[in-house]
Amino acid sequence: MSADLAMLRARLGSLVAAETAQMRDFLTVLEQERDVLGQPDVEPLFALAERKTQIARQLQQFSAARAALLAQAGLPNNRQGIETLLGESSHAAWDDFVTVAETAQTLNADNGIRITERLKSNHQALAILMSASDQPTVYGPDGHARTRPGSRHFGSF
């Protein structure tokens, strides 16, 4: 093995370890998000969403760095390329990353479903409250029903 290939292998190994640690942090935030979604007070979601965005950006940077390393080694940016560059002794590290990433993907999808269900419930409750307020239903320019007409100032469009 050439010295360049050994250096690239070591860099990829370090990168995969750091990326796995970052993905575990992402998974922790997703678990916290799941817990908050089960509570009546969802105010903490704002901070969690910000943290999720920060981690996602860092994960994108790791992915770009990994792609650059693989390109430098003349390998495709896929599982086969990663496993080839890592070598037999480091497949477990990549497998660990993939397992954590798949768990995060599943939990993120589940949280998305919970958020959608919660929004639907909130919209239904709002519709019930608005209909009970004796406001006439009108239709807006987009064709959707509105429970109260919007105010329009003279000279506005």
Image (spheres, helix red, strand yellow):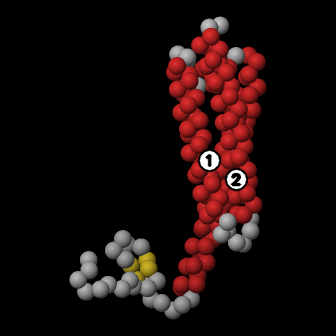
133 horizontally vs 15: left or right: left
Residue sticking out furthest to the top = 1
Return the x and y of residue 30 as percentages of the image width and height.
69, 52
- Vertically, is 57 above or below 34? above
Residue 119 found in image quarter: bottom right
Secondary structure under badge 1?
helix
> Residue type at mark 1?
Ile
- Is disc 1 in contact with disc 2, using a CB cutoff of under 8 Å? yes
**N-term mark: 1 or 2:** 2
Which residue appears farthest toward the bottom when viewing the image?
134
Q: Identify the residue position indicated by label 2 in the image.
A: 29
- Three-letter residue code for mark 2: Val
- Residue 148: horizontal and vertical position, in percent? 43, 85
Q: Residues within 10 Å of mark 2 (few under 14, many from 20)?
A: some
**Who's the residue at 65% across and 14% down the image?**
6
> Going 64% across and 25% down the picture, which residue do you hit?
12
Residue at numbered disc 1: 55
Question: How far apart are the two marked residues, 1 and 2, measured between alpha carbons?
Answer: 9 Å
Q: Residue at x 75, y 60 (%)?
A: 35
x and y percent of residue 153 in the render? 29, 86
Splitting the image into 4 quarters, where does residue 123 fall?
bottom right
Secondary structure of the residue carrying tag 2 is helix
- Above or below residue 107? Residue 77 is above
Task: Say which quadrant the N terminus sits in.
Answer: top right
118 is higher (above) or lower (below) than 110: below
